[in-house]
Amino acid sequence: MSEIRKHYFLDEYCIIAPNRGFRPSDFKKTDEASNSKKCIFCKGNEEKTPPATAVYTPAGVTSDEGGVVRDWNVRCIPNMYPALSPKKSSSDQLAEGFGFHEVIIETPEHDYEPSMFLDEEITRLIRIYADRYTFYINKDGIKFVSLFKNYGSSAGASIAHSHSQLIALPLIPPIIKKEMETETCPFCDIIQRESISKRLILMQNDWIAFAPYFSKYPFEVWIMPKEHFPDMSKLSDVSGLAFMLRNVLSRMHALFGGFAYNYAFFQCTDKRYHFHLKVFPKLSVTGGFEENTNIYINPVSPEDAATQLRW
């Protein structure tokens, strides 16, 4: 039986419609035509991208300022087709589209992505995410940093080689502001609720992963710290978050095989906010109804998704 479910605390709705009879095998897998020889993100093709602003190597952090660095684990480069521009010529930053747009190339290996990463590799990536977030959030005029990953063409990735993106904005998105309009932290309440629900997937020390009651997308997962803190600059130990993300992605990979996905970090500097991460497998396509109503139809109940992801 279908259900119309309301968001935990916002005036938003989704439709859970398991009677559509979808199974994991019904969903579209990635259809990437991988060609490492032409890939500008692969090791050996460093000159084909803009000079790296940060290069994480076995010896430490450097940049391409003194020449192209060849021995690297992760490269951070300006986006070649940026959504925003770091140049300011007046005080009207919004009209000028002021901001920064960076690509984080997560690995030198072409057919390798975070669901396959070893513990030390995913931990390093999370540490770099925190480093790049902190670097940009402290820049003059920046109020919010969007940090996200698109993997697979159906998830919005234009290059097959695994990478993440960071867009630093001169404004705080309205949805983030709205999530802080309650007297107490609603995410702390959600953690209490979901830690004992059928939607719980994994709980490890100070972290929890669950399929949210309000799930817009099939097999959507939220990862949250039990401790309340607003952003990654306050995250002294990244190993817990790295463990949770790697486990969630590897469980999805075991269930779906190769699959497209997005994940995004939700954070800001306001102490009222509760940092969290959302993972969205790109298993179905939204259509006109969703665009018309902003109400999403999800053919997999979060309770069923959690059961399949718990193994």
Image: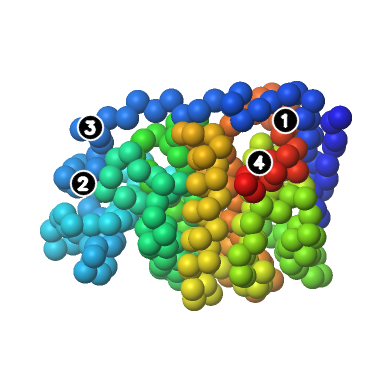
Badge 3 element:
helix
CB contact under 8 Å: marks 2 and 3: no
Pick whichever of labels 1 and 4 is earlier in the sequence.
1
- How far apart are labels 4 and 3 at the CA level? 38 Å
Q: Amino acid at mark 3?
A: Lys
Badge 4 element:
helix
| Residue occupying the point 53% across, 53% down | 247
Pick whichever of labels 2 and 3 is earlier in the sequence.
3
- Left or right, 93 with respect to 158, comes to right
| Res. 299 mark | 1
In the rendered image of this protein, does residue 35 appear above or below residue 70?
above
Q: Which residue is denoted by mark 3 in the rendering?
A: 38
Pick whichever of labels 4 and 2 is earlier in the sequence.
2
| Residue occupying the point 71% across, 54% down | 200
| Res. 43 mark | 2
Percent x, y of residue 195: 74, 61
In the rendered image of this protein, does residue 10 appear above or below residue 65?
above
Q: Which residue is denoted by mark 4 in the rendering?
A: 308
Instruction: State the image quarter where residue 127 is shown.
Output: bottom left
- How far apart are labels 4 and 2 at the CA level? 37 Å
| Res. 49 mark | none
**Front tag of 4 and 3:** 4
Q: Amino acid at mark 1?
A: Pro
Pick whichever of labels 4 and 3 is earlier in the sequence.
3
Percent x, y of residue 12: 79, 44
Mark 3 Cα within 10 Å, few/some/many (few <14, many 20+)? few
Pick whichever of labels 3 and 1 is earlier in the sequence.
3
